[in-house]
C-alpha cells in the first residue's frame, strides 16, 4: 500500500484527548454554501465593517507604518501597547469600569482572552457555569480544556438569579464547585437579551457568597440602540470579575484586537499564558486601533453602527411578525446583533437547515450549537448585522415559508 | 503526451458537497499541473456558461458532487454549449444519481440489493403515507437506513435503531431531498469499486477498497476526517466476493450507461453475498477519497488518469444534447 496506513493519518493514535470532536462536520459543509451570494446568510455574527470610513482607516494605517513602522512591525510587550491600554481604559469607563492601564492585557481578539482564561483555570472535568444558551466560541474554548459546562436558565432579563442559586446549591450537594460563571450580560449572543440592572448586583452577591469567579464577556455593550450603556459587572466588583472586551464590534473584527482585565494575581498568569500562545498581540493592529481611538471621533462611529443595526433589527422583527407561524416566538434585542427564535413544537432547527439553504436560500445557526448538553433543538439564531434591511426582510420571509413547510411535514409525521 | 490545450475543472457550486468538491478539484488540478497541463478552476455559478463560451476549453473535468454535478443538469448545459467533458452523459448521470432508479435498474439486471421502500415527502404529507410507517418498519425490520434518494457524502442519512426515531430520520432526510430511500440495514463489509474505461472504452475495475469506519458509521465525519476510517486495499474478502463485487461495479457502469469513470458501493454479507448500494458518476478525489486510493494501489497516477480522461473527452468532442445513454445489451441480460 505504498506505506499508506489504513487510517490515512499516521498520527491518529498520538493526538491529545482534547482533539476528540475535531472532525469534518455536516454543519460546516452546509455553511460553506451559506457564504455564497445566492444565499441570504443570517448565520454569522459579522459586523457591517463597510460602514467604517475606509479612506480614513487607510490613512491611519499608512501613518502607523510611516511614523512608527519599526515598532509596528516588531515584537512588543506581551501585555500589549501601553498607549492602547490607556485608551482602552477610556472605553471601559463608558460602562462604569474604573481600571488602570496596568490592569489591561491586550489579546488577539477576545477569543484569545477566552482561551487564556480557560487555560489558566480549567483542568479536565472542571465545571464552568454558563447561560442557557451561551456563546458558541466560549463553549469551544472551554471544550478545548475538557471542561464540563453546566447551563443556567435565562429569561428576557438575562440570567435568572434563582436558577443560579439553585444550580450552586445542587452542585454543593454533589460536592462540586464551578471554576467560574461565564456571562454575556449585554445584548447576548445568541439570546439577544440583556441582564437587567436589578439582577447584576444580586448575581455578583450570589457568586461572591459561593466563592465563584465571574467571567464577563462584553463585546456588544456599547451597541445599545437607545444609546445608554449598562454598568458592567466589573464596574460593580473588581475582585470577583474577569472582564473581556473587544474592538471587533465597535471598530473592526478583522484586526483581531480584544482585551482582558483581571484581578492582579490572575492578570500575571494571563500575561504568561498569552505570551506562551502568541508572544505578543499584533503590534500593527494595536497601533491602528490606538490611532483610530485617538484621532477619530470613534464614539460617533459607534453611534453610526448603533443606528444602522437598529434599522436592521427592526426589519428583522417586523418580518418575523409578518411571516412566521403564530406558534413561533422570539426575543426582542435592545442592542447587538441577534434574535433568538423558538420554533413551533416538534421542529428541529438543525434538521431543517439543509431545506432552508437549498430551498429557501437562507441560512441561520441552529440552536444546539449554543449548548454543551444537546439542548436547543427547537431554537435558531438569526443575525441581522450584515445583510441590508431588504435582504433581511426577504431572508426572514423565505425562512418563514421553510418553517411552515417543515411544520406541515412534522405534523403529518405525528410530531409537534 | 498529447496536444491537450487549456482545460477547466468545474467545482464548488451551491451543493452541500461544495467543500468536498473544491477539495477534489484542488487535488485534480495539482496532479494535472505536475504533468504540465494548462488547467484552471471554475467555481460554478450563474456565469459559468458565459465563461465557457467566451473562452472554450479543450475539455472539462467535472469535480462537482451532489445535485449540480451528478444529476445531469450541468452535463446537459455542457452538451448544449458544445463543451466536451469527462464522465457520464446527462442521461446516464441522471439514472445513476437517483438511488431508487439506479437500484431498480441493477435489480432488473439480476443484482441483489438490500430490501427497500421509497417514500416521497408528498406521499407522507398529502397521501397519508405516515400511517404506513409502522408497516414499513415491520417489513424491513430494525435497524433500517433512511437516505435521500438523490445526494451524497452520507448527508441526510440516518440509521434508525428504534421505531420512535423513524419519523425524525425522515424529516432529516426530506430536508435534503423530496424522496427518501428506506433500506434494510445490512451488516457486512462495505466496498467501493472504481471503474475506469481504457482508451478503447472498455471499462476496467480497480481493486475494491474496503471501508471500515472506526465508529461503525461511514458518515460525513468518517468520510472526510483522516483517521476516522480504515481503508484496506486489497480488501480483506474472499476471492468469490471480490470477483462478484467487481462484476456488480462493471455491470452498474454499463447498465446505467455511464462513461469514463464511476464508483459503485456495495456491501458484502457474512455469507459472501454482494448487495448493491449506489453508483457515483463524479467520484470524490479528495485525500480521503476512494478512487485515487484504488488507482494508486495498481500504480496509476491520479494526474495521468485525469489527463488521459481529458484527452479522451477532447478527442471525443461534445456529446449530443438529449442523447440517451448507450447501455450494453449484455449488461441487461
Image (cartoon, rainbow, N blue to C red):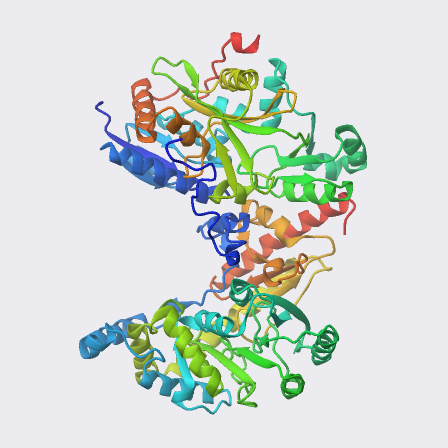
The relative height of residue B45 versus residue A326 in the rendered view (above or below) is: above
Residue at 63% x, 75% y: name it.
A178
**Residue A309 % position (x, y):** 50, 71
In which quadrant will I find the N terminus of chain A?
top left
Please tell me in which quadrant of the rendered image residue B139 appears: top right
Query: Looking at the image, can residue B251 be seen?
Result: yes
Please tell me in which quadrant of the rendered image residue A129 appears: bottom right
**Residue A255 % position (x, y):** 36, 70
Query: Looking at the image, can residue B45 be seen?
Result: no
The answer to whether residue A96 is left or right of residue A156 is left
Query: Closer to the camera, A369 or B129?
Result: A369
* Count of labels in the image: 0
**Residue A11 % position (x, y):** 43, 47
The relative height of residue B156 versus residue A343 in the rendered view (above or below) is: above
The answer to whether residue A313 is left or right of residue A152 is left
Please tell me in which quadrant of the rendered image residue B54 appears: top left
**Residue B214 % position (x, y):** 56, 41
Query: Closer to the camera, A244 or A223?
Result: A244
Residue at 59% x, 71% y: name it.
A192
The answer to whether residue B269 is left or right of residue A26 is right
Amino acid at each position: 500500500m505504498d506505506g499508506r496506513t489504513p487510517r490515512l493519518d499516521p498520527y491518529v493514535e498520538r493526538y491529545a484527548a482534547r482533539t476528540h470532536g475535531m472532525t469534518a462536520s455536516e454543519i460546516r459543509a452546509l455553511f460553506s454554501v451559506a457564504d455564497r451570494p445566492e444565499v441570504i446568510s443570517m448565520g454569522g455574527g459579522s459586523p457591517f465593517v463597510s460602514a467604517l470610513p475606509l479612506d480614513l482607516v487607510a490613512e491611519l494605517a499608512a501613518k502607523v507604518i510611516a511614523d512608527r513602522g519599526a515598532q509596528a512591525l516588531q515584537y512588543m510587550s506581551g501585555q500589549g501597547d501601553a498607549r492602547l491600554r490607556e485608551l482602552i481604559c477610556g472605553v471601559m469607563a463608558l460602562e462604569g469600569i474604573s481600571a488602570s492601564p496596568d490592569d489591561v492585557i491586550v489579546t488577539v481578539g477576545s477569543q484569545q482572552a477566552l482561551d487564556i482564561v480557560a487555560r489558566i483555570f480549567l483542568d479536565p472535568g472542571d465545571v464552568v457555569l454558563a447561560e442557557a444558551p451561551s456563546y458558541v466560541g466560549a463553549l469551544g474554548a472551554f471544550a478545548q480544556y475538557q471542561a464540563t459546562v453546566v447551563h443556567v436558565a435565562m429569561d428576557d432579563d438575562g440570567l435568572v438569579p434563582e436558577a443560579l442559586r439553585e444550580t450552586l446549591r445542587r452542585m454543593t450537594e454533589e460536592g462540586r464547585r464551578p471554576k467560574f460563571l461565564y456571562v454575556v450580560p449585554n445584548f447576548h449572543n445568541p439570546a439577544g437579551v440583556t441582564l437587567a440592572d436589578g439582577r447584576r448586583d444580586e448575581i455578583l452577591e450570589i457568586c461572591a457568597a459561593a466563592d465563584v469567579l465571574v467571567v464577563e464577556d462584553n463585546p456588544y455593550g456599547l451597541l445599545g440602540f437607545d444609546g445608554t450603556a449598562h454598568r458592567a459587572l466589573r464596574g460593580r466588583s473588581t475582585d470577583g470579575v474577569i472582564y473581556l472586551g473587544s474592538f471587533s464590534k465597535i471598530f473592526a473584527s478583522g484586526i483581531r484586537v480584544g482585551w482582558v482585565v483581571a484581578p492582579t494575581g490572575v492578570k500575571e498568569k494571563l500575561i504568561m499564558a498569552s505570551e506562551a500562545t502568541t508572544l505578543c498581540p499584533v503590534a500593527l493592529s494595536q497601533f491602528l486601533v490606538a490611532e483610530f481611538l485617538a484621532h477619530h471621533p470613534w464614539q460617533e462611529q459607534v453611534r453610526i453602527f448603533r443606528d444602522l443595526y437598529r434599522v436592521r433589527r427592526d426589519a428583522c422583527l417586523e418580518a418575523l411578525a409578518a411571516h412566521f407561524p403564530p406558534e413561533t416566538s422570539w426575543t426582542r434585542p435592545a442592542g447587538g446583533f441577534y434574535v433568538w427564535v423558538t420554533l413551533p413544537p416538534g421542529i428541529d432547527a438543525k434538521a431543517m437547515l439543509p431545506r432552508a439553504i437549498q430551498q429557501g436560500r437562507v441560512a441561520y445557526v441552529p440552536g444546539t450549537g449554543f449548548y454543551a448538553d444537546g439542548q436547543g433543538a427547537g431554537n435558531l439564531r438569526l443575525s441581522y448585522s450584515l445583510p441590508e434591511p431588504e435582504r433581511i426582510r426577504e431572508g426572514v420571509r423565505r425562512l418563514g415559508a421553510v418553517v411552515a413547510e417543515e411544520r406541515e411535514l412534522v405534523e403529518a409525521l405525528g410530531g409537534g | 503526451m498529447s496536444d491537450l490545450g487549456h482545460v477547466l475543472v468545474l467545482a464548488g457550486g451551491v451543493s452541500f458537497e461544495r467543500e468536498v468538491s473544491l477539495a477534489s478539484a484542488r487535488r485534480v488540478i495539482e496532479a494535472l499541473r505536475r504533468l504540465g497541463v494548462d488547467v484552471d478552476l471554475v467555481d460554478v455559478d450563474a456565469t459559468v456558461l458565459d465563461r465557457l463560451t467566451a473562452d472554450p476549453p479543450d475539455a472539462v473535468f467535472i469535480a462537482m458532487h451532489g445535485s449540480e454535478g451528478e444529476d445531469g443538469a450541468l452535463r446537459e448545459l455542457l452538451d448544449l454549449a458544445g463543451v466536451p467533458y469527462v464522465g457520464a452523459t446527462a442521461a446516464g448521470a441522471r439514472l445513476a444519481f437517483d438511488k431508487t432508479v439506479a437500484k431498480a435498474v441493477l435489480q432488473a439486471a439480476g443484482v441483489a440489493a438490500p430490501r427497500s421502500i421509497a417514500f416521497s415527502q408528498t406521499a407522507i404529507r398529502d397521501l397519508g403515507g405516515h400511517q404506513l410507517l409502522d408497516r414499513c418498519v415491520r417489513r424491513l425490520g430494525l435497524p433500517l437506513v433512511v437516505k435521500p434518494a438523490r445526494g451524497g457524502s452520507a448527508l441526510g442519512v440516518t440509521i434508525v435503531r428504534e421505531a420512535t426515531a423513524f419519523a425524525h430520520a425522515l424529516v432529516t432526510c426530506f430536508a435534503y431531498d423530496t424522496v427518501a430511500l428506506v433500506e434494510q440495514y445490512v451488516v457486512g463489509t462495505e466496498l467501493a469499486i472504481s471503474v475506469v474505461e481504457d482508451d478503447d472504452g472498455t471499462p476496467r475495475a480497480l481493486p475494491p477498497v474496503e471501508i471500515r469506519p472506526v465508529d461503525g458509521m461511514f458518515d460525513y465525519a468518517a468520510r472526510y476526517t483522516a483517521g476516522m476510517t480504515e481503508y484496506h486495499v486489497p480488501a480483506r474478502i474472499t476471492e468469490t466476493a471480490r470477483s462478484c463485487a467487481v462484476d456488480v461495479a462493471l455491470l452498474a457502469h454499463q447498465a446505467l450507461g455511464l462513461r469514463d469513470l464511476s464508483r459503485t458501493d456495495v456491501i458484502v454479507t457474512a455469507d459472501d453475498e454482494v448487495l448493491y448500494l449506489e453508483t457515483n458518476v463524479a467520484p470524490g478525489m479528495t485525500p480521503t477519497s476512494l478512487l485515487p486510493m484504488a488507482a494508486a494501489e495498481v500504480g496509476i497516477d491520479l494526474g495521468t488518469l485525469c489527463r488521459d480522461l481529458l484527452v479522451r473527452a477532447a478527442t471525443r468532442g461534445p456529446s449530443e444534447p438529449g442523447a440517451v445513454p448507450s447501455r450494453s445489451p449484455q449488461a441487461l441480460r
